[in-house]
Image (cartoon, rainbow, N blue to C red):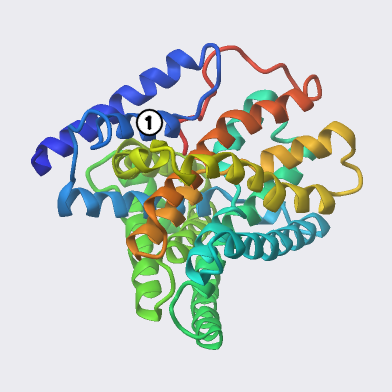
Amino acid sequence: MSQPGTLILIMTIAVLAPLLAYGVGRWLPVPLVIFEILLGILVGPDVLGWATSHGEAVDTLSDLGLAMLIFLAGYEIEFDKIRGSTLKRSVWAWIVSLAVGLGLAVALADWSYARGVYVGTALTSTALGTILPVLRDSGDLHSRFGSVLMAFGAVGEFGPIIAMALLLSGRSPLDSALLLLAFAALTALAVLWAMRPRPPWFSRVIAKTLHSSGQFAVRLVVLLLALMLGLSQVLGVDTLLGAFAAGMIVRLVLHGAAPDSADEVLGKVEAMGFGFLVPVFFVVTGIDFDLKALLDGGTALLLLPVFLALFLVVRGLPVHFFAPADLIGGDRLALTFFSSTALPLVVAITTIGVEDGALPTDVAAAVVGAAMVSVLVFPLIGLKLRAGKGERARPKGPVKGAESW
């Protein structure tokens, strides 16, 4: 199929996916990303064969979708609300997860360092953007449980990106650390700039152009994202780190300079991201998914339940151990399952691994398949363990916000 035809097919799937999510959501909350990937697999070369390749233009849009996905993850995290001992516990839990994940993954990969690092890092991630809407609808988001999960989930998104920058740059650990420190220093300067009071005209321009063709705030957001992506490329660190940092900086700028307009500006950026770019990334992920390798009776299919269990072992057990003492019984177990839920970063990390030639497509398919099962099963188990403890009953119908990630 030609590039324009493939793009039309991808956007058709992007329109169909939320309709399916809405219909199925009446009985079972299924994140939209699942339908985007599954429909991509359906039209891909291993099933219907409608999209056997996607060309440079679609690849570029897919890369932009990945950057926007990580950018919105950085924007979503409110670090000022997760500081203190809980944040320290979440950092230690992730460090233990990384050590365990790398050890197990390298062993499973026949002691291949590169392959083990990709898989091990993916196992340490948490799909915070997927579970936050579930917590919001269950009434747990603003509870003590919700704040603890926010801390562990935030580190579960930020940590793997740092690990990618350090471990998969192709440079020595010292050189990688120095470049990462340089990036951190420049990012800190950008954060300080973002926290400075803006002159009165700044918020006036944002408000005046918010509903005009000027769209100053949206253009500023795109500029900051482009600057941080460019900075990460110049310093040779992973562009995911640049996108994540851009999200944090944009949040500081908007909430500091135009708090009354910040939510509306974010809505416009999310419309651009989740309405166009992010779906392209996930559908292309489905098209490239090596279903044949997963189902051909080899080891890939056997690895899927193994990786699903490893998400609990690598990510869940350290979280269970380091969880605050006031979380006991069902709450502690619920935190374990919610924190073990992973998908967006798993897709991103395995995609990069396949593109770099370090990760076989069948292994990538097994890891992504396990992550898809985790977002379908683990949050439901977590909700069951938290049954009746939320501020309000979980409503019927589709999960609000499930389209995010």
> What count of labels does the image hold?
1
Nearer the observer, 168 or 75: 168
Nearer the observer, 138 or 37: 37
Q: Quadrant of residue 141?
A: top right
Mark 1 is surrounded, within 10 Å at the Cα level, by few (under 14), some (14 to 19) or many (20 or more) other residues, namely many
Q: Position of residue 220 (x, y in %)?
A: 35, 58
**Left or right: 28 as drawn, with respect to 384:** left
Q: Position of residue 8 (x, y in %)?
A: 16, 33
**Left or right: 52 as drawn, with respect to 244:** left
Q: Position of residue 186 (x, y in %)?
A: 49, 78
Q: Secondary structure at mark 1?
A: helix
Where does the N terminus fall, quadrant-wise?
top left
- The amino acid marked with disc number 1 is Leu
Name the residue at 89% across, 34% down. 329
Q: Position of residue 232 (x, y in %)?
A: 40, 72
Name the residue at 75% across, 58% down. 93
Establish if 340 lies above or below 43.
Answer: below
Q: Residue furthest front?
A: 297
Q: Which residue is mark 1?
A: 38
Establish if 358 lies above or below 178.
Answer: above
Name the residue at 86% across, 49% down. 324
Establish if 396 lies above or below 126.
Answer: above
- Is residue 198 visible to us here? no
- Is residue 385 visible to us here? yes
Name the residue at 19% across, 37% down. 51
Nearer the observer, 183 or 365: 365
**Left or right: 163 as drawn, with respect to 291:** right
Nearer the observer, 156 or 51: 51
